[in-house]
Image (cartoon, rainbow, N blue to C red):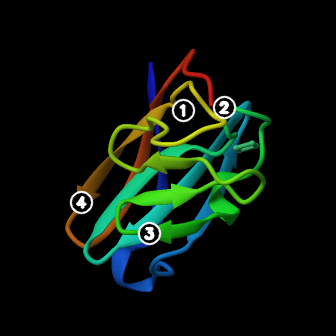
Amino acid sequence: MSHQIALGPVAEMPEGRGLRVEFGEHRVAVFRIGDSVYAIGDRCSHAEASLAEGEVFGLDVECPRHGSEFSLETGKPGSFPATRPVPVYEIRMEGAEAFLVFEDGEAS
Ligand code: FES
């Protein structure tokens, strides 16, 4: 079953820095880059630091603890020490509003 959480108008979301969204077991890092919104698992796959607190470079976010960079599009790490991807979540747009979509059973 899928669920969605309203994130609000894209224009009001902070740009270039993360927003942590928690729902039940889910912990998701949401980023607005220009008019686009990306959502990946917030727990770094190396040692669970919060990726929402990382610095954004283009379409990558740098883990604040040990510096692995994760793609906001694919969730894959582009540098060590992380080697495993984090989940990528769907963002659904309805007009100017963004919604975070996830399925039951998805881990973050
Ligand atoms: S906790 Fe993210 S790279 Fe180590």
Which is more toward the observer, 31 or 78? 78
Q: Amino acid at mark 3?
A: Phe
Asked if marks 1 and 2 touch (Cβ < 8 Å), the reply is yes
Residue on which the image places disc 3: 57
Secondary structure under tag 4 reads strand
Question: Hey, which quadrant is residue 25 in on the image?
Answer: top right
- For the residues labelled 3 and 2, the Cα–Cα distance comes to 19 Å
Residue on which the image places disc 1: 86
- Of callouts 2 and 4, which one flags the residue occurring earlier in the amino acid sequence? 2
Residue on which the image places disc 2: 45
Taking 59 as reference, is 4 left or right?
A: right
Q: Position of residue 1 (x, y in %)?
A: 44, 18
Q: Which mark is residue 94?
A: 4
- Of callouts 3 and 1, which one flags the residue occurring earlier in the amino acid sequence? 3
Residue drawn at x 29%, y 49% as measured from the top left: 92
Q: Position of residue 58 (x, y in %)?
A: 35, 68
- For the residues labelled 3 and 1, the Cα–Cα distance comes to 17 Å
Residue 103 lies, with reference to residue 18, above or below; the image says: above
- For the residues labelled 3 and 4, the Cα–Cα distance comes to 27 Å
